[in-house]
Amino acid sequence: MVEQQALRIRHGVEIPVGELTFHFTRSSGPGGQHVNKAATQAELCFDVARSPSLSEEQKRRALSKLHSYVSREGLLRLSCQSTRSQQQNREEAVERFVALMRAALEVPKARRRTRPSRASRERRIVGKQRRSALKRLRGRPADGDP
């Protein structure tokens, strides 16, 4: 596999692969002697707070949206141990990182206030009158009614 120079997060935002650091440890779970000898669990670390690739606004947005993944020092950590291959775990960690950063850096669309149309207001009033009449009919009959 050819190593990428930068990960494209979204338009105008690319993070160089050099800003990511990887640590490999032994995985847990079944696997026999392979698990006991091979360091296949991949842990990806990315310093969100000091990244030169992100603007201050992007850092603030990422830190607030990814607070459960980020330490007090601003270090984002993702670990992956789903496969027995170190390379596959590393690739999966990178894919998860890109997906998380895309979601975190998504700028929500500003809501524009709208007013209900005249027809929708009239439908609402007619519905309320119908409901009111239905409830009025449920009551006890008046003294003069048989």
Image (spheres, rainbow, N blue to C red):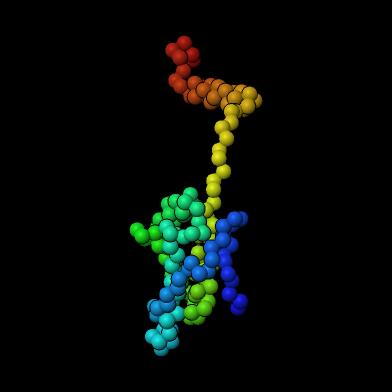
- Residue 110 horizontal side relative to residue 144, left or right: right
Q: Is residue 69 visible?
A: no
Q: Position of residue 33 (x, y in %)?
A: 41, 88
| In the image, farthest residue toward the left | 72
Residue at image location 58% in from the left, 31% down from the top: 114
Extreme-bottom residue of the structure: 33
Give the vertical position of 75 relative to 33 (above or below).
above
Farthest residue to the front: give it.
52
Q: Quadrant of the N terminus?
A: bottom right
Displayed quadrant of residue 43: bottom left
Please name the residue shown 49% across and 59% down the image: 52
Image side of residue 1 versus residue 92, left or right: right
Q: Position of residue 50 (x, y in %)?
A: 43, 59
Q: How many marks?
A: 0
Q: Position of residue 123 (x, y in %)?
A: 61, 26
Give the x, y percent position of residue 75.
40, 62
Work out whether residue 5 or residue 93 is closer to the camera in this orientation and state it: 5
- 42 on left or right of 116: left
Of residue 79 and residue 136, the one placed in the foreground of this image is: 79
Whether residue 26 can be seen here: yes
At 50% from the left and 56% from the top, the residue drawn is 54
From this viewpoint, which residue is outermost toward the right?
119
In the image, residue 84 sits, relative to residue 116, either above or below, namely: below
Residue at figure coordinates x 59%, y 55% from the top left: 12
